[in-house]
Image (cartoon, grey):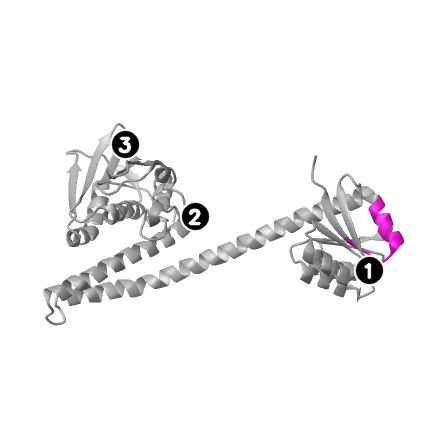
Amino acid sequence: MLDKTSVLLVEDSTPDAKFVQKLLSKQKFNIVHVTSLSEASQKMASESFDVVLLDLSLPDGNGLGSFQRVKDISTNTPVVILTGLDDDETALMAVKLGAQDYIQKADVNPSFLERSIHYAIERKGLEETEKKLATYEQREEFMATLTHDLKNPLIGTNRVLELLAEQAMGEITHEHAELLLQIRDSNKILLSMIQNLLDVYRFEKDMDAVVLTRTYLRDILANCLKDILPIAENRRIKINTNYASTEKLVQADSMAMRRVFQNLLDNALKFTPPGGEITLRLAPIDDEVCIEIEDNGPGMSDDEKARIFNRFAQGSAGRKFSPGTGLGLFLCKKIVDAHHGQISCESVEGSGTKFLVCLPAA
């Protein structure tokens, strides 16, 4: 049995109220009748209704002011004005102010009223959905602008830190240089987080569609290694490479795939303990070119593996799969999918983690 549609009927005329109640089937509608705006306010404060049927002439309200008061009480409830007033100008203004319909009592019949109620509920639902989408898009735009504006100061700060550590601006102790480089490495992690936010936004908005060119994944990976080797050295993490002697070209967006490998390498660095190892393997497999990135960190449970590519995925016990945002692996999957490739993960708790990325050979 379908749930009944709950209706708040605001009508001070007893004959008119009985007429409306007679028009609407008791099997389909649950009608609560009040005779004033104050009663309507009390009812709407304690109960929720699918729709309000509102007369404009009430003891404590008249004209469109009555509609505005009901709308202020509950902005999410659709209102259908049911009135004896035959005034096209008032009807047009009511709709502009947000009324879902304007019905004259003289024109009403059972099927017409029932249809008007159902349409009002559907239209209001669509309006609320559109408002939520607009708010979401505004928030996403704000986040994209904010994160973009955060990048340049961090990049400039890192350059100053490197100059200080290189003693380009005067002599400092070895301990001070090490400390400066640690701050730089922390800033690089923050920059990676910011870039992930920007890239997810662009890919979801189709603002940064991949541009495919013939390239070697080895070259993209080499550029990533240049960035992470200093961090790995500071943490005493050894990076091993095992590349096949021959390699096939792939059709890839070099910048997008660099984000993939950068995120995977950042992950491996984050979870590999000091003195540990990360191993990179690259080889053609059938009609694909595959890259493995394996660490000897703590590994993951089956539950964690099942959701690591979800947006904002977080690990157990406060662990995270990307530097701080939960977006790194989500972004990796979106980029690899855009290349018609595959990304997967193998991991056992206590035995490290291995990510495999395969792209079609050109």
Q: What residue type is labelled 2?
A: Glu
Give the residue number, with chain letter if any, for mark 1: 87
Is residue 18 covered in magenta? yes
The residues bearing labels 1 and 2 have C-alpha atoms spaced at a distance of 48 Å
What element does badge 2 sit on? Answer: helix
Q: Give the range drawn in magenta.
A: 9-22
* N-terminal label among 1 and 2: 1
* N-terminal label among 2 and 3: 2
Q: Are marks 2 and 3 in contact (CB under 8 Å)?
A: no
What element does badge 1 sit on? Answer: loop
- Residue 242, by quadrant, is top left
- Residue 186, by quadrant, is bottom left
Residue drawn at (87%, 54%) of the image: 14
* N-terminal label among 1 and 3: 1
Q: Which of 301 and 321 is in front in this view?
A: 301
Q: Are marks 1 and 2 in contact (CB under 8 Å)?
A: no
Give the residue number, with chain letter if any, for mark 2: 204
Q: Nearer the viewer, residue 9 or 209?
A: 9
How many C-alpha atoms fall within 10 Å of the one at disc 3: few (<14), some, or many (≥20)?
some
Q: x and y percent of residue 328 in the render?
A: 34, 48
Q: x and y percent of residue 358 in the render?
A: 29, 35
Q: What residue type is labelled 1?
A: Asp
Q: x and y percent of residue 225 in the render?
A: 20, 48
Kindly identify which numbered label has been placed on residue 288: 3
